[in-house]
Structures are given as C-alpha cells and as structure tokens.
Amino acid sequence: MLPGRVTRSPEDQSSQTAFVATVMEDLQSDLNIELPLSQETFSDLWKLLPEQAVLTTPVSSPINDFSDVVVKWLESPEEAAQTSADPTLEALAPVAPTLAAPVPATSYPLSSSVPSQNTYRGDYGFRLGFVQSGTTKSVTCTYSPTLNKLFCQLAKTCPVQLWVDSPPPPGTRVRAMAIYKKSQHMTEVVRRCPHHERCSDNDSTAPPQHLIRVEGNSHAEYLDDSYTFRHSVVVPYEPPEVGSDFTTIHYNYMCNSSCMGGMNRRPIVTIITLEDSSGNLLGRNSFEVRVCACPGRDRRTEEENFRRKEGPCSEPPPPVGSTKRVLPTNTSSSSPQPKKKPLDGEYFTLKIRGRERYEMLRTINEAFEFKDAQAEKEPEESKAHSSHLKSKKGQSTSRHKKPIFKREGPDSD
C-alpha cells in the first residue's frame, strides 16, 4: 500500500456514484421547471434562432461535463489530475495579456559643426545695442553690459539694436541662432521642451520646436539646416529710419532656461550674423541669454556674484549718505601705524566782537590747551607706570617662589 493513498471498497464507490446521479437529476428537474410571468425557457429561445446562426459543432452540456469530472475524481484522483491537464482545456483558458514594450525616448541628432562666437565687425562696423533698463521687479527684459547677458521672460519682447558704420549691400539678411555655451553641450541643438512644443502659439508660421521667434515681421524665415540640424531665423536687413542710427529687431524666446527636456538650466548664447544674399558673412556678434521668471532679480544677483569674484578692488564706492564704514584692505597687525603729527607752534590773533562770544571762544581755547598738556604727560607717566609694574611683579614672584632641593638617595638599577 502506498503511503497517503486511500483505498475504497466497491460498495463505497457505488454509493458515491448513486449520490452524484441523484444530484444531477435534481438539477435537470429544476431546469425543466416552467418559469413564471410567461418567461420562455432557454431551449425555446434557442429554437427561435435562425439555422444559419446555430453553431455546427456539437456543444456539450456543462452539467454532464461537471458530473463526469466529479466521478473521475472520486474514482481515481491521479487520472482526474491528468484529465484536468488536457491540452484542449489549456487552449480554452484565458491568455494573460502581454505588456507592451516601453517606447524609447526620442533622441535628437547632434550637430556636426559648432558656429563661432567671436565678435567680427567686418567692413561695415556691425555691432549690437540694447535698451538701457534697470533691475526692478516689473521689468520683462534687461541687459547687463558687465556680463554681456540678456535676461528676459518667456515669450516677451526683447528689442535688439543693429548698428553699422556704413550701409551694407542690398539683399543683406540678419540671422539669429542659439547654441549652448559650455563645451560639453555645444554639439546639441537648442530646442524647446516637449511641454512648450505642444502649447498652442499665435505664430503659426514658426515651427513648434524653434526657440527664437521674430515678432512683428512677416518676412521672417525659419530654417532647419539639413547638415548641422541647427535652428535659425532669418529676416531681411532694413536700413534705419530717418533720424535714427540703428535698426531694431524684436525677438522672443519661447522656452524657459530651467525647462526639463529643453535647455535644462544650461546657459545658451545667441549669435547674430549679418550675411549677404549669397550667405557670406559680413559681421558677427553674440550675447548670453537667460529666460527666467524675474529678470531684474537674476541680473542683480549674477552681477553681485561677479563683483565678488573679481575682488575688493573692483567694488564700487559706497553711495553718498551711506552709514556703512569701509573696512581697510590690509588688516595685518604687522603694518606700521602712522605717527601723530606734531603740534603747530604758530600763534594767531582773532578779532572778536562782543564780550560774551569772546568768553566762549576763550573757554574753548583753554580746553584745547589743557588737552594738549595732558597728552604730552601721558607717554611719560605710562612708561614709568609700566616699569614700576614690571619691578613689582618680579619681586612678588621671587618672594613667593619656593626653593627646590635635590634629594640624594641610594642608587637603584
């Protein structure tokens, strides 16, 4: 006899089979009961279906299948376990849905070349200018000459002035391009973050991934270089108006410097180039840009940090009326102190009108004379006092000092 195997007598098996048969008959009798409220049975509904919709394959009754499984399980559990592992039943089992593979992040191509940032005025003296603005909280665009950096808000107007010494030839164009400032990011193309790319903009002519836009110019052309993959915007050069010495172009920056997936706090530089109709370079200039929520505050903070790095010599003098004291640059104790100037020995005579005024000035003069006399006596008295203290200290130490005697005893190894 195998351990754990229960043997049944033929009488027990026949009684169990009779019990299962009785249960099956009761279930079938319950199904054949006519339903109240004139409800049709399942067999009647099945006969109402058209012949084309009836399944051609025979359908086994679930009750008979269930009874067969129960009988086989009671007779021999091992055979029932093998029956449950039937491949047809496994095929009917629901299949778990497979998880879709994650979509990889979009990788943008790197640029094969890095444009130059060096200033080149050319034969026409090309240079840039900016509107002078302060660092107030309400300012939306401000330029720092110390840092050569433009601070502006998202999608706000940034006027840039174009200065030339002589007018360039007809057909000249102005190109604006943004690149990353640090060398480890220069090969990447500056583009907007995915969030701002999906935002609806008023300018439908500009591609959504372009960072720099030109405001109020219908001739603006947005280009994607097929070789370097860099974005740029080109507008035709317009000569200054009558009475003006420069031409103004209004730029917009359509993404913050701190946006994830875009600039991601990486500093950028905007390069403005003057080109002829064939694309030849006539002039170049550049400036750093930071797109932030509070341009005035950020400009003030960065200028203060720049002055601290430059050293105390470059610090501006304190404003008039300030109560702050300027600390000396050399605070070493070894530096010699300047000697006091000797008193002037000349005498002067004043003609004073009025007795009362004369007595007041005479009292002031006597007070100064008394102060000078005390100042001359103080050095001599301080020297005598210090020598007296030194002698007294030496006597006290010698008086209270205990003599030390050497005790001689037997030598010991």
Image (tube, rainbow, N blue to C red):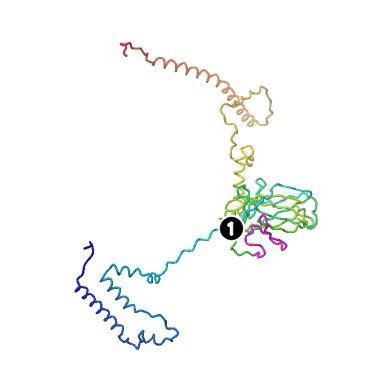
Give the camera-side residue of 204 and 302: 204
Task: Tell me if residue 97 comes above or below residue 295 in the rendering.
Answer: below
Q: Estimate the x, y position of residue 197 in percent, counting from the top left.
A: 60, 61
The residue where tag 1 is placed is 193
Magenta stretch bounds: 202-228
Residue plotted at (28% across, 72% down): 72
Outermost residue toward the front in this view: 1
Outermost residue toward the bottom in this view: 38
Q: Main secondary structure of the magenta part?
A: loop
Give the camera-side residue of 338 and 21: 21
Give the camera-side residue of 169 and 330: 169
Q: Estimate the x, y position of residue 32 in percent, counting from the top left.
A: 30, 85
**Residue type of the residue flagged with mark 1:** Cys
Q: Estimate the x, y position of residue 150 in percent, counting from the top left.
A: 65, 51
Give the camera-side residue of 197 and 350: 197
Residue plotted at (26% across, 69% down): 76
